[in-house]
Structures are given as C-alpha cells and as structure tokens.
Amino acid sequence: MSLESRIENSITRVFKAVFPNTTNHYDTLFGGTAMQLMDEVAFITATRFSRQKMVTVSSDKIDFKKPIPHGTIIELIGKVTYLGNTSIKVRVDIFIEKMYDDTREKAVTGEFTFVAINENKSAEKIIVD
C-alpha cells in the first residue's frame, strides 16, 4: 500500500454533540475538553496509520478560531501530516455544525506529535511497507 493510501485510510472522523455539561460559563465548549478530544482523535489516527503502540509527545500550536456553543454538533477530523523515523504528526480540525441547518465552519486546528514505542517504552522505528 502506498504512503498516500495509508494516510487516506487512517483519516479519522468523530462526531460529538456539545451538551451543557461540557461547557463553561459562556456556554461554549471548555478549551481543555476540546484539546482532550483532539488528542484522542490524533491518537486514533496515528495508531490506525502505524498499527503500532503510540504515545503523545507534544501538542503544537492549537488555534481556537471560533467558540463552540452548546447545542451544536462538532466533527473532529484527524490526518497524518508528517512521518519521521519514530514520530508522526497529526493535524486535527474541529468543525462546528448547527443542529438544525446546514451551517458548518472550522473552529479549532491543532497539531499533535506521536512517537512509536516498544515493550520497553523506548522509541521504535515506524514501519512503513
């Protein structure tokens, strides 16, 4: 399988409804909750790409472009953007959709770096056929 096919096949999409228990006093999604969801989607993407044990080693610039109000649907999309010997970078975008119309806009973007590890928890080469 080509590298491009592996990247396409590992794209991860997760939908969530934003309920009041996940929002702050402004009735928008907590930033920390958004980051947790993004890290989880990035982890799934990196694991689906590599099929190896992966751990988060950093989160790079995370841009909160728009607040995410309660009562909306969000879609998180993870895609591999860089492949090193032992590391993978994954970009995660969060899109907001209003529940009762077709409006959709990008709210958050961030990059996460993962490293493949072995049973001794040491960095391991990412195997690409």
Image: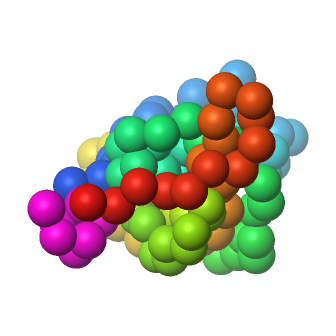
Please say if 98 is above or below 71. below
Seen in the image, is 117 located left or right of residue 84? right
Q: Residue at x 40, y 64 (%)?
A: 79
Q: Which residue is the extreme one toward the top?
A: 21
Q: Please provide percent x and percent y for residue 75.
A: 40, 50
Which picture quadrant has residue 110? bottom right
Q: Please provide percent x and percent y for residue 118.
A: 64, 36
Please say if 89 is above or below 56. below
Q: Residue at x 41, y 55 (%)?
A: 127
Q: Is residue 68 visible?
A: no
Q: Residue at x 46, y 34 (%)?
A: 17
Instruction: Name the one closer to the observer, 47 or 94.
Output: 47
Q: Please provide percent x and percent y for residue 69.
A: 60, 50
Instruction: Name the one closer to the observer, 125 or 32.
Output: 125
Q: Quadrant of the N terminus?
A: bottom left
Q: Is residue 81 visible?
A: yes
Name the dominant secondary structure of the magenta segment.
Answer: helix
Which picture quadrant has residue 54? top right
Q: Please provide percent x and percent y for residue 31.
A: 78, 51
Q: What scheme was used to colour the molecule?
A: rainbow
Seen in the image, is 46 located left or right of residue 58? left
Q: Which residues are magenta?
A: 1-7
Instruction: Name the one closer to the observer, 114 or 25.
Output: 114
Seen in the image, is 25 located left or right of residue 59? right
Q: Is residue 64 magenta?
A: no
Instruction: Name the one closer to the observer, 121 or 18.
Output: 121
Q: Quadrant of the C terminus?
A: bottom left
